[in-house]
Image: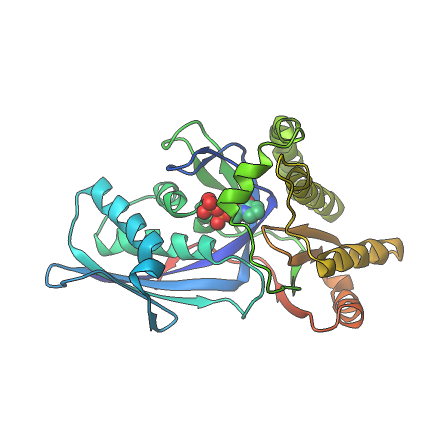
Amino acid sequence: MKKTARAHTNIALIKYWGKANQALKTPLMSSLSMTLDAFYTDTTFEHDSSLTEDTFILNGQKQTPEESKRVFNYIHLLQEKFGFNDHFTIKSTNHVPTSAGLASSASAFAALATSFAASYGLDLSRRELSKLARLGSGSATRSIYGGFVEWQKGIDDASSYAVPIDENPDLDLSLLALEVDTKQKKISSTKGMKLAQTSPFYQPWLARNKQEIAELKQAIKEKDFTKIGKLSELSANEMHACNLTANEPFTYFEPETIKAIKLVENLRQQGIECYYTIDAGPNVKILCTLRNRKEIISAVQKSLTNVKIVVASFGPGVTLL
Ligand code: 2P0
């Protein structure tokens, strides 16, 4: 049986940055994201008793055993869970504008979990799919749904899943993904979130999580762009502050990252409202409304030469093609 699923990636406005259980990828905090229309992954999963090996083809290229390891381990885990053991072929295409600085693991594992379940004829709810996606990558938990999505941390495998907050938000909100990438080898998310936990600010940050989620949900309900922007920027800065103050301090920021932050601050001082968020890399994402979008794009192009900008808005949840 062969099935194809499409999942869009997402950007966390309230960040996930720490695991309670490494294997289950249950988080230490709840997170809240926006699914993005501009970035998605199409994945076909085929299993057949006549196949003699497992194969992973990414963007048309057969992956080496080393490159396939994470994906194969994930599928073997799911097969064990449901009692299957035949060989499979995975064909995956990332529709992510080159180096837009958005991780593809969220869309990748959401599409993979969904195509896997469909090809074995498992009739799973989206909640169950979000739990399966979580076993591949934390952020994938949220990509099962569209619009605004909360990943409720829960206390174990059964209770840690995503719930839709508003799948079709009637809200003027755009995200500008700025690629300010460099050749620097980055610290993996898994390693970064472990290190961050040694910061003296990590526990106080965790203690604020419930309140921050509640405030952002309220801001979404009220369609309050200012509140949404401020809370998102705060969460990103809290995460990066923990990295900078870890026992072995580190940062994902590069000089261009700081330039982009300063630009956003300057734009705000000029009355052009916008906010930034930054993940586990040097790229900056700007949140803005349609009214200011053009002006912000030209300001970015003027002060950050060589930067590539991709415009995104709300994307849908996972679908079978
Ligand atoms: C997030 N990030 O909430 C946070 C904010 C990056 C910064 O989730 O180890 O690839 O697979 O669970 O999901 C990126 O890490 O990490 C991430 P794993 P993931 O989106």
Question: Which residue occupies 39% across, 53% down?
Answer: 109
What colour scheme has been applied to the protein in the rendered image?
rainbow
Residue 200 appears at what percent x and percent y? 66, 28
Let me know if residue 307 appears in the view. Answer: yes
- What residue is shown at x 71% (from left), y 46% (from top)? 233
Q: Nearer the viewer, residue 27 or 269?
A: 27
Question: Farthest right residue?
Answer: 270
Which quadrant of the rendered structure holds the C terminus?
bottom left
Q: Please indicate whether residue 320 sits to the left or right of residue 230 in the image.
A: left
Q: Residue furthest front?
A: 248
Number of on-image labels: 0
Quadrant location of residue 299?
A: bottom right
Is 252 positioned to the left or the right of 112 in the image? right
**Visible residue check, residue 123:** no
Q: Is residue 122 left or right of residue 146?
A: left
Between residues 178 and 228, which one lies in front from this camera angle?
178
Q: Residue at x 41, y 57 (%)?
A: 108
- Residue 313 is situated, as x and y percent measured from the top left of the image, at 60, 60
Relative placement, left or right, of 184 versus 82 is right
Front residue of 279/269: it is 279
Residue occupying the point 59% across, 42% down: 15
Picture quadrant of residue 59: bottom left
List x then y, in percent, for residue 90.
29, 62
